[in-house]
Structures are given as C-alpha cells and as structure tokens.
Image (cartoon, helix red, strand yellow):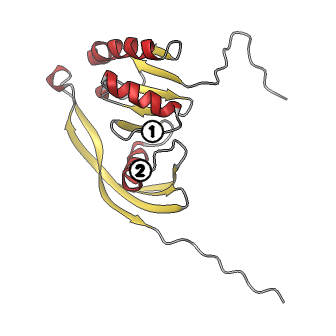
Amino acid sequence: MAGVVPESCILEDEPVFLVCTHAKRNACCARIGLPLARRLAEVLPDRVWETSHVGGDRYAANLVCLPHGIFYGSMSQAAAIAAANAYRSGEVILDRYRGRAGIPEPSQAAEHFARVHTGELSVGGVAVESSRSEGDVTEAIVRCGEVRFQVVVEPSVFQAPCGTACAETITTYRLVSLDRLAPVRYATPALT
C-alpha cells in the first residue's frame, strides 16, 4: 500500500536548519543559540527553526542541517551562516562539524578525520561502511569516493567551550591512525 501524506504536513524541497534554543538542559543553548537563530533567520527567511534539545547541548550553539542530519557545534553567527550556505551548495565545512545523525559518535569522528585527511567536503562524498569497538578504541572503514581508509579513534576529554558557565567536560575523539586500504581486486576465472 502506498503511503499517504497527511494534509497537515508541509513537504520541503529546500534545506531546513534547526538551532537549539532550549535553556532547561543547558542555559548556553538559549544564551548563545537564540541570537544565532535570529541572525540566521534574517539571512535565510523561512528556513530556520528554533528547536528544543537536539543533543550535545554542551556544544552550544548547535546547528542541524536537514534533511541530511548534519550537526555543527559551538557555532558563532558567522560560522552558522557559512555552514548553512555550504550545505545549500551540497557541502560541509569541517570547522565545528560534529558529524551526521544516525551513526555512533566514534564513527562520526572517523568520518571527520577522513574528511580532514582527504579534503572531501561534499555531503554524500564520505560514508562509514563499518565499525567495530574493542574497549575504548574504535576502528572504522570509511569510504571517500573510490578510496577506503581504516580509521582508528579513541576517546579524549576537554573542557566545554562555554567555560565555567556550564562546568561540563566533553568527550570527543582523537585520531590514533588513518591508513589507506589497498583496493580489493577480485579474480574471475577464465571462461572456457
């Protein structure tokens, strides 16, 4: 049976941007997010929504680019405008790039390190094909175009960028290794 779109739904064919302005979990989301959302809405009218908690409130101000679920954190107004414009052109900006919704944090970090290594900025140009964790260390296979990399990451902790206002530490990831994988060549038997 084919799906039916409810009459109350509004289908969008252009990107939509979410900015967390929810102060209940972290006051910085409102303090930093609200002015950012308002400025971004001036530049991109009807494309920006203030939203409640999107996760990662310790990275205030957060920006989410839909429909791909691209997350940015610790955004200034200028950085948010640059990220939104890049996304509208089908690209990401690596500065303040947190990753993509729907994949585990270590895999998001592996994707980021692969993008930094290759310079690949297109939204769909990088994909995490697989990952496995052993203790704190995660190994991911990341494809950038036709090239595949083995990316190994481990947790690292630092102080939240908003300082003592939040008094939180952030778990992020550091690169352990990044190695290009040899292409897989399949031998086909000769036909007789």
What amino acid does circle 1 point to? Val
Give the residue drawn at x 50%, y 55%: 144
Q: Is residue 11 above or below residue 59?
A: above
- Whichever of labels 1 and 2 marks the residue nearer the N terminus, that label is 1
| Residue 21 in view of the camera | no
Give the residue drawn at x 55%, y 44%: 124
| Residue 7 in view of the camera | yes
Q: Are there few (<14), some (14-19), or many (20+) residues within 10 Å of tag 1?
A: many
Residue 44 bears which disc, if any?
none
Task: Quote the CA–CA distance across marks 1 and 2.
Answer: 10 Å
Q: Is residue 100 above or below residue 32?
A: below
Check disc 1 and report the residue beneath it.
Answer: 92
Q: Are there few (<14), some (14-19), or many (20+) residues within 10 Å of tag 2?
A: many
x, y (%) of residue 158? 20, 39
Tell me which corner region of the image, top left, top right, bottom left or bottom right, holds residue 166.
top left
What amino acid does circle 2 point to? Arg
Please tell me which residue lies in front, 124 or 43. Answer: 43
x, y (%) of residue 49? 48, 15
Please tell me which residue lies in front, 47 or 151. Answer: 47
